Structures are given as C-alpha cells and as structure tokens.
Amino acid sequence: MATVLSFLLLTGCPDLVGVPASQVWTITWADCGLGTCGTSVTVLKGGSITQRNPAPKAFVGACSYSIPVSGQWSGKIFKITQVGGGCGETVQSLSQGDANGEYGKATTAHGTVTWTFNKGPSVTDTWTARLSH
C-alpha cells in the first residue's frame, strides 16, 4: 500500500499530468447591465474560481459597489457566484454554464445569470467566458 501511495504522490494523477496549475479566464456579459462588461478570473486546477482584476460593479444612481466573482469548475460545469452590496442595496447571483471541455482542455464556456437585488427588479443576462492564457 505504501508503494502505491508513494507512486501516486510522486507521479500525480495521470489525467492531470501536463495540466496547468492555474488559468486566466475572461468573463463577459451580453448587455453590460451592471455597468461593467467583463472581468478576469483565475481558475485553479482543483476547480476554484476567484476574482483576478477589479470586480464588476453595480450602480445605484451616482453610487456604485463591487460584486466580485467566485465559483467552482467541475467536469464541464462552470459555476460562477457574485455577492455584493453597498448604496443601501445587496445583490447576489448563482449561475451555472457549460464549458466546451474539462479543465485543461476547454477554451470557452457560456451560461445565463440572474442577479437578484434586495431592492428593485432582478436582472437576467447571458455570459461567455474564454481562456485568456
């Protein structure tokens, strides 16, 4: 048993050999309803998605607040979440989309998102993501 465990620790999982430890993806929304058309995220080999550059913003009159992107990638499912608040308002979203392959092979993903606000109507939009590098 120790020999098998040592082999796996030294060689890694065969399916993930040659797969980068992290990738940068750019996510864009179709109509820029929140005032920001896109953002970049870092995706780790294990599937964690985190905000990379300044987060998208929601605007309430002259006031704005950030709604950073986080999420998880599992198989071909690309999930992104946004939670933020300010200006007397909060917003949250959970969106699931499809990638054109698994991590390390995929180059694009797409889905639909609905942002739910504590004040005002919800906003629905589509998004696309593409591998940046």
Image (spheres, rainbow, N blue to C red):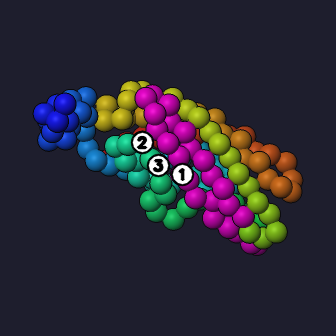
- Which quadrant of the rendered structure holds the N terminus? top left
Tag 1 near tag 3, CB within 8 Å: yes
Residue drawn 34% across and 43% down? 45
| SS assignment at label 1 | strand
Residue 105 % position (x, y): 31, 31
Instruction: Please name the residue that numbered disc 1 is placed on.
Output: 70
**Residue 91 picture quarter:** bottom right
Q: Is residue 14 visible?
A: yes
Density class for disc 3 (Cα within 10 Å; few <14, some 14-19, many ≥20) is: many
Apparent side of residue 111 relative to residue 62 in the rendered image (left or right): left
Secondary structure category for the residue under label 3 = strand
Q: Check disc 1 and give the amino acid type.
A: Ser
**At label 3, which amino acid type do we have?**
Ile
Q: What x and y, as percent, mark residue 76?
A: 45, 28
Q: Which mark is residue 47?
A: 2
Residue 93, placed above or below residue 7 = below
Instruction: Give how far apart the Cα atoms at labels 1 and 3 are.
Output: 5 Å
Q: Earlier in the sequence, mark 1 or mark 3?
A: 3
Q: Which mark is residue 49?
A: 3
Q: Does residue 87 show up magenta in the picture?
A: no
Question: Can residue 78 be found in the magenta stretch?
Answer: yes
Q: Using the image as rendered, state which of residue 64 and residue 117 is in the foreground.
A: 117
- The label number, if any, that marks residue 84 in the structure image: none
Residue placed at 55% from the left, 61% from the top?
55
Image: magenta residue range: 62-85
Kindly report the distance in space between the C-alpha atoms of the residues bearing marks 2 and 1.
Answer: 11 Å
Q: Residue at x 25, y 38 (%)?
A: 19
